[in-house]
Amino acid sequence: MAMWGSLVITLCSVPCVLAQNSVNTKLALFDKVVTKSLIAQGFSGPQAFHFRRSQEADRRTYESICVLPLSKADQHYVIAITAAPSGKLLDAAEYEKRRGAFLASDTEESRRVLDRDFPNIGLRALRHQGSFGPGGASYSLLLTTSDGRFDIRIAVSNLLSGTIPDPGFDSTKIARLIACRYDGVTRSPVLK
């Protein structure tokens, strides 16, 4: 009986491991989409930055840390782009609920908010206005790929003194480029 129990546990754990490896393999296609050269296109001008990729469970993150003349240890300008299976980063029902509230209120202000916070990128996109304060901010743009398979979060976090020029990263531009590149990679049998 103990052997049978071990066998059942082993058989049950194999699909979990295989499923996890499958997610990692699927997320690896973003290595062709989110590159250092793509990130560079998001800055308003030439900007030096360090680029690294990391994987944790069902998420793959591409982090860009700007090289700036920082005067304090807590100062930073970081862009983190995370890819995950659909529904992990952007909940479709919550998105529809939030967007629906603005659609129902047919005013000039609601149309302005729709254009700004719900850009037409991929299957759905939502700008999250995180926090803003003296010298710093944190915000993100979330989107679901046009085929509905993956969510992507482009997060920007910065804390800069007034003497350091803002690198001017355009998360909307990068979201559009990522969506376009993803569609090209997933529709091309050569690049899959």
Image: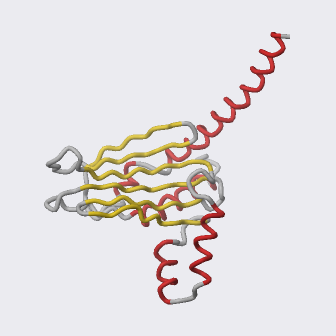
Question: As drawn, is 128 to the left or to the right of 14?
Answer: left
50 lies above or below 174: above
The residue shown at (52%, 66%) is 126
The image quarter containing residue 27 is top right
Residue 40 horizontal/vertical position (percent): 34, 55
The residue shown at (18%, 58%) is 161
Instruction: Name the one closer to the observer, 152 or 139.
Output: 139
The residue shown at (27%, 59%) is 136
179 lies above or below 83: below
The residue shown at (37%, 52%) is 79
User: Residue reaching furthest bottom?
Assistant: 107
Residue 72 horizontal/vertical position (percent): 17, 47
Residue 131 horizontal/vertical position (percent): 37, 61
Instruction: Name the one closer to the observer, 101 or 119.
Output: 101
Residue 103 horizontal/vertical position (percent): 60, 81
101 lies above or below 79: below
31 lies above or below 40: above
The image quarter containing residue 73 is top left
Quadrant the N terminus occupies: top right
The image quarter containing residue 26 is top right
